Structure formats: C-alpha cells, structure tokens
Amino acid sequence: MALQALQSSGVAFRKILSHFPEELSLAFAYGSGVYRQAGPSSDQKNAMLDFVFTVDDPVAWHSKNLKKNWNHYSFLKVLGPRIITAVQNNYGAGVYYNPLITCDGRLIKYGVISTSVLIEDLLNWNNLYIAGRLQKPVKIVAMNEDVALRSALDQNLKSAVTAAFLMLPESFSEEDLFTEIAGLSYSGDFRMVVGEDKAKVLNIVKPNMAHFRELYGSILQESPQVVYKAQQGSLEIDKSPEGQFTQLMTLPKTLQQQINHIMDPPGKNRDVEETLLQVAHDPDCGDVVRLGLAAIVRPSSMRQSTKGVLTAGASPSRRGDGTDIGARSAGDKCTEGTCRRA
C-alpha cells in the first residue's frame, strides 16, 4: 500500500500515543509539525503536532479517554461519551477535535473519527475533510489489519490523482500534479480566503516533493491514463472526451453527484452518467470538477469550524478546524501528569 512507505517508527510519536486508549484502527500525524513547510509554517520545532485517531467504537473510546484525559475535553465532557460521539458523528465533518494539549513537552491537537465514517469519506468524498488530509504525506503511527480501511486509503489516493488529471492540461510537471492534489481539500474552503495563508498549498508541496513521489509514484506508474516520465518529472494524459469520460466515471460518488447538480438544468432530471458525458465534451471540464469539489468542501469546512466552538470552548483566536492559535485556556494535569490542556 502506498501509504506504508511513509510509516513512522519515531519514538516521540509512539510516546504521545501511549497516553491514549489503545483501541485505534489508524493513527496518523500530519501538518507542519511533521513535514517541513515553506513560508510562515516553517518552524517545525515549535509547531503544533496534529493527530487523527480512527476508532471502531467512538463511545467506548471516548469513555476510556475521559477517564485518562478528562481535562482534554470542553464542557461537553460532563454530558458523557454518548453525547460527545453524537456531536462527533452528526455535526461538521464527522471528527471531534481536542486542541491545545501539552503532551511530553509538545503542543498537540488530536481529532477522533469513526472508522466507518472515515471509510465512507475516503471512498465517496462525503466531505473531503480527513480524506483530504490523507491525500497529502502523513506519518502513520499505528494501523491495524482492517482490509476495508486499507483498501479505502488506496482508493482515496487513486481518486485524488483522477480528479487532478481532469483539472490539468495535456502535459504537466510532477509539481503541477502534486499541487493540484494537495489543493483538492481546500477547494472552496473559506479559510483560504479569511484565515489560512493563500500560498499554503505551494508551501506544502515544494519542500515535500520526495514524499509526494513516495505516496503517488506507484499509482502513476501503474495508471493506464498517464504517461509518467519519472526521470524528467513530466506527465502526459489523454484529454480527449473519451479519456475524460473514463476519468469522470471513476470519480467518488459525492463528487459525481455535485457535478450532476451543477450541470443539470431545472426540470431535466438527467442521470449522472448522461451529465458526465456532457461534461467530458465541455472545454471547461476541469472548471466544472473544481466547482463540484468546492460544493463538497465549503459546507463541511464551515460546519466543522462552527462545531469547534463546542469541542474546544471559546477563544479570541481560532483556526477554522476548531483549533485555538492565540490565547490558551488553563487546565489541570491529567492522571499521567505528562499530558494536559495547555
């Protein structure tokens, strides 16, 4: 599996993981604290470490984590693990974040997502929130033998390549491709206008070209849709209507539905395949795909940001995913004494 090339056996990550309940189907670290970024996020040493924990039974996991790490949670902790899980699954992008935790001397935040919800997002791109994170290099800290999850992780990468192909010209460079892929989950994200650095995508890609090659190299070599000249770092794809229709038909279901919604005139009620055939012949095919991505990402990013007020508590300075980046709320040490709210 392509993701395994980026697995980390780093002691620092495993030590942090030891402070949490063990029942994880997947745990990964991502962001500027893990992979070097250009621009304002280039200070890796002091950057927050971002984690996502995937769990089969969120109620059971939150119940154990509340006992170990009570002070990681906002006021929702008094309502118990079932309410926390309901907020996690039913609002925003299906992930529950606890931000601003000091653990083994590092500032971290961690999100918790149900394995089934993640698999659905990886396969269908329901909101492209965590699936989008996994289209960029991450450090896999733990993973079990869940065949369905591993297959969905691979499919997410293949779908990312296909979507990027549709938005690129006939010939392009590796950097062009990886920049398009890294930007998929930012399409329509309001944070890219009002909060995050607008050059964020390029800052992610440029220092990490080797990691992107590790992640996508085998997919590109095996894809019948592309001529990949790895030595020169160049690629060529079939931009004929037939080639684009093949690519459109393999896109994740939610993106196909959004494209159909955008292109289907009122009262027509065409099926998705008919609409995709029309889009394949459209000179603006790539722009239509981009609009479909924005229709997925924009509402999910806004809902997740609103949800952050509940899961992280009020703060005068906040990132769109519910993470405080300015003032920090005080908290008591948790039972181990090494992992506490900053």
Image: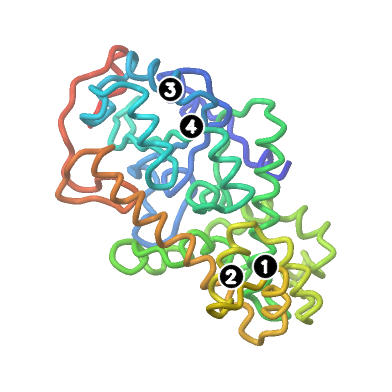
Badge 4 crowding class, 10 Å Cα cut-off, few under 14, some 14 to 19, many 20 or more, is: many
| Tag nearer the camera, 4 or 2 | 2
Measuring from the top left, give residue 6's x and y in whole percent: 63, 41
- The residue at the point 66 percent across, 87 percent down is 283
**Helix, strand, or loop for circle 2?**
helix
Q: Mark 4 points at which residue?
A: 53
Q: Which image quarter is the N terminus in?
A: top right
Looking at the image, which is closer to me, 45 or 271?
271
Residue type at mark 3?
Val
Q: Are marks 3 and 2 in contact (CB under 8 Å)?
A: no
- The residue at the point 68 percent across, 38 percent down is 4
Q: Are marks 4 and 2 in contact (CB under 8 Å)?
A: no
In 3D space, how far apart are the residues under numbered discs 3 and 2 (Cα atoms)? 36 Å
Residue type at mark 1?
Val
| Tag nearer the camera, 4 or 1 | 1
Q: Mark 1 points at which residue?
A: 272
Q: Name the residue under label 3.
A: 59
**Helix, strand, or loop for circle 4?**
strand
Q: Do the residues labelled 1 and 2 touch (CB within 8 Å)?
A: yes
Badge 1 crowding class, 10 Å Cα cut-off, few under 14, some 14 to 19, many 20 or more, is: some
| Tag nearer the camera, 1 or 3 | 1
**Compared to 144, does 188 lie above or below?**
below
In 3D space, how far apart are the residues under numbered discs 4 and 1 (Cα atoms)? 35 Å
**Compared to 112, does 30 lie above or below?**
below
